[in-house]
Image: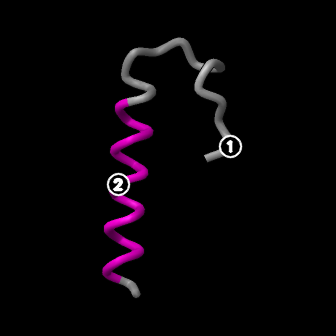
Amino acid sequence: MGYNDNFIPDGMNAFERNVKRIGDCIIAGILL
């Protein structure tokens, strides 16, 4: 959350970021 995509030159960065985003959306949906 506050991290820049270009800050960490890791191939898994985008994948992990997408997984976290989807996970947060699912958790938010369940809580709501």
Magenta residues (range): 15-30
Q: Secondary structure at mark 2?
A: helix
The answer to whether residue 14 is above or below residue 21 is: above
Instruction: Locate residue 27, reporting x and y percent.
Output: 35, 71
User: Which residue, as the protein is rendered here, is positioned at the far bottom?
Assistant: 32
Mark sitting earlier along the chain (2/1): 1
Magenta-colored stretch includes residue 26: yes
Tell me what residue is drawn at x 68 percent, y 43 percent: 2
Tell me what residue is drawn at x 65 percent, y 30 percent: 4
User: Which residue, as the protein is rendered here, is positioned at the far top?
Assistant: 9
Magenta-colored stretch includes residue 18: yes
How many numbered badges does the structure rendering display?
2
Which residue was labeled with disc 2? 22
Report crowding for label 2: few under 14, some 14 to 19, many 20 or more residues within 10 A (C-alpha).
Answer: few
Report crowding for label 1: few under 14, some 14 to 19, many 20 or more residues within 10 A (C-alpha).
Answer: few
Q: Quadrant of residue 14?
A: top left
Which residue was labeled with disc 1? 2
The answer to whether residue 25 is above or below residue 8 is: below
Instruction: Locate residue 9, reporting x and y percent.
Output: 54, 12
Q: Amino acid at mark 2?
A: Ile
